[in-house]
Image (cartoon, coloured by chain):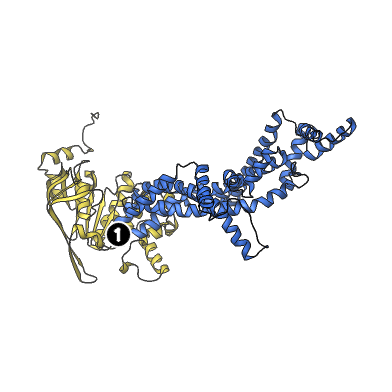
Amino acid sequence: MRLLRYIAGRLVVYLLVVVFGLTVLFFVPRLGPTDPIEAMLAKVASQGAYMDASQVDRLRESLADTFGLSGTLLEQYWAFIKRILLTGDFGPSLSMYPTPVMELIMNALPWTFGLLLTSTLIAWVLGNFVGLLSGWKPEGTSSRVMEGIAICLYPIPYYILALVLSILFSYVWKIFPLTTTIRGAPWSWDLVTSILWNSFLPGASIVIVVFGWWVISVKAQTTAIKEEEFVRYARLKGLGDGRILTHYVLPNAILPQITFLALQIGLMFNGSLITEILFDYPGLGLLIYSAVLQGDFNLLMGTISLSVIAVATATMVIDLIYPLIDPRIRHR
Amino acid sequence: MITVDTVTVGYGTTAFVKAVDAVTLTINDNEILGIAGESGSGKSTLMRAIYGDFSTGLRIAGGTVTGRFEDERTGVVTEAQSRDFGKLWWDQISYIPQGSMSVLNPLMRVEKQVVDGLPKREREGDRAALRARIAKFLEGFGLHESVLDAYPHQLSGGMRQRVLVAIAAFVNPRLILADEPTTALDVVVQKKILLMMVEIQRRLRNSLVLVSHDLGVHYQITDRLAVMHRGKIVEMGPTAEIFANPKHEYTQTLIASLPRIDGERREARA
């Protein structure tokens, strides 16, 4: 019963956060001076099509209808919220009219998700492993070397690292493709290798850049927890180093890292803008980029709404999972 | 049991800071030995040297700490210097820390924390049998079986301290060292826990060393008392005798500072 109430409470908060986010998202663009209908009409006119006044009026009306801009502001708002929460419909893309925004997003999502999820998880596991060991035995040569590498990699701006990788490994040494071109029949081995081959450099660039951060943060955790009294007590019990590390230090050090990981996964829906632009990777980031360039309001709203929902969902999932991994949160 | 022979203990390697200065002391079988003294008098350092906990730069600069452990269950007699005591931890020697909030692993259930580190001889039987024995043992401390499934944060300070005493006692060692085991508790809980420790010592007939700055604690349970001041033992003898007839000036001051029921009421002075 208490558990049900806890979950219900979380769900209510979740819904409120999502609605609040969508509300901001609805009103902020309307504060700006641009009118997407007039912009569209201007675009049509600039393409040389001649329309008389009544035709323009009819086009204006139908555009207002498809863009969800008819009616008063409040009516528009309710229609917007209902449409997104109930049907997940963001309308047609303006730049790739009449393809629905949802379809474009659904095409891009697996790419972003596959790339980011894999590289984030690899970086997380590697980073935590290295950071944990270097925090545990800071004097060891290997942990010093690994930590040195992490500290050197950590402050490099991402775009520089990605460019350097790209120049080195696909221009100077032509090992990996410069831009992403996926070939192969569906579900064939060729397709799989092609995807892996094309995703290697963008994936590696993300792993390298995030790795350092995981190392540094888990190392700080480990160094602090190592000095905790329960670790000293475990040592005075005569427990071995391995057991102390795996049963006393690791579970306590990894807890905050799990929170960060879940937040990272939530942020994934933003796509990795720079990665996808630099490597021409057909994910959400590239989609947002082209939406901005082409003034595609619907597509922008769609991708941003999705990332609002995704971050809120990730946070809720952490809240629901956390009691399973941290007993101190379970019983209150 | 343990012979401490003119031992000098301190911290640091280049600049050596002396904390215990040429102390000689014997811990006998089947006794409760108290070590008293103010903060910084070296009593905890001495205890660590006896336990063999040479981490954080602790080092014996002179003298020896020798232990002789007769295990009547196996008939094995182990003799060792305290720097080699590590392999006897949670077998022949166990330790009761001062029960702050963070002595127990916050993410581990109490049952597992009792079992973790137990010597083989105390682990006999399957998990259920071991659990039943631990539960029965905890009952003697006034702790319900449900405590075994609890996480440390769910227990009160007094319960946590009882758990710590129980963990050390369940090992069934020849020597238990207790470092300020009741300092953080109120006097009622303190008294309960002290009586439990006496009860255990009488039952196991092993040795208990109790380090505390609180002379009242020593008066209640110790058989012998060593009073430390500035790294030296200034007075040592049967507790009752020391309280009846303190020889050293420092001991006299300590005893005089204890509140008395018939004493006159005075304002505290800085």
Is residue A286 or residue B46 the one in the foreground?
A286
Per the rendering, the colour in which chain B appears is yellow
For this orientation, the residue located farthest to the front is A172
Residue B51: x and y, percent?
22, 55
Q: Give amino acid for label 1.
A: Gly
The residue shown at (69%, 33%) is A29
Side of A227 where A123 appears, left or right: right
- Bin the neighbour count of mark 1 within 10 Å (Cα to Cα): few under 14, some 14-19, many 20 and up: many
Side of A234 where B210 appears, left or right: left
Residue B87: x and y, percent?
25, 62
Side of A296 where A246 appears, left or right: left
Chain of the residue under label 1: A
Query: Which residue is denoted by mark 1 in the rendering?
Result: A238
Q: Which chain is blue?
A: A
Residue A153: x and y, percent?
44, 46
Residue B142: x and y, percent?
37, 56
A39 shown above or below B13 = above
The residue shown at (69%, 51%) is A106
Provide the secondary structure element on which disc 1 rests.
Answer: loop
Is residue A68 or residue B101 the one in the foreground?
A68
